[in-house]
Image: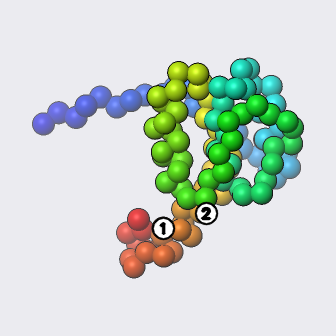
Amino acid sequence: MSQPPAVVNDHLVLICGTSGSGKSASLRNIPNPEGVIYLNCESGKKLPFPSKFKNLTVTDPQVVFRAFEEAEKLPDVHTIIVDSLTFLMDMYESVYVLRSKDTMKGY
């Protein structure tokens, strides 16, 4: 049985750096900010500038998957930002892995 072709997205960007180095501030000049969905995984953290991004506070890692699925249906959305991947992975571990009966299987 053949596998369907993988979906390739060559428009991915990862911005990394130490805390306070300007990663979030680098988002300030994204063109057409109304077409950006900003998934904030650090509850309480605000962007260091006023923005017109569509903001969503992530309190469960599954929200990220649903947000991507919904964004694909919206023709005006051109960019999705997950801030930050470190907090998202920590959240996933604390919500799904550490609470699992078998932490080796996780979720």
Query: In the rendered view of the protein, which quadrant contains the C terminus?
Result: bottom left
Relative height, residue 70 to residue 106 (above, below): above
> Around disc 2, counting alpha carbons within 10 Å, would you say few (fewer than 14), some (14 to 19), or many (20 or more)?
few
**Residue bearing the label numbered 2:** 90
Are the residues flagged by discs 1 and 2 in contact, CB closer than 8 Å? no
Tell me the amino acid under the disc marked 1: Tyr
Tell me the amino acid under the disc marked 2: Asp
Q: Earlier in the sequence, mark 1 or mark 2?
A: 2
Q: Residue furthest left?
A: 1
User: Residue drawn at (51%, 75%), measured in percent from left and top?
Assistant: 98
Relative height, residue 75 to residue 22 (above, below): above
Q: Estimate the spatial distance between the alpha carbons at disc 1 and disc 2, rounded to whole Å.
A: 10 Å
Mark nearer the viewer, 1 or 2: 1
Q: Nearer the viewer, residue 19 or 74?
A: 74
Kindly identify which numbered label has been placed on residue 96. 1
Residue 60 visible within the image: yes
Q: Quadrant of residue 5?
A: top left
> Around disc 1, counting alpha carbons within 10 Å, would you say few (fewer than 14), some (14 to 19), or many (20 or more)?
some
Query: In the rendered view of the protein, which quadrant contains the N terminus?
Result: top left
Q: Secondary structure at mark 1?
A: helix
Q: Secondary structure at mark 2?
A: helix
Q: Quadrant of residue 21?
A: top right
Residue 86 visible within the image: no
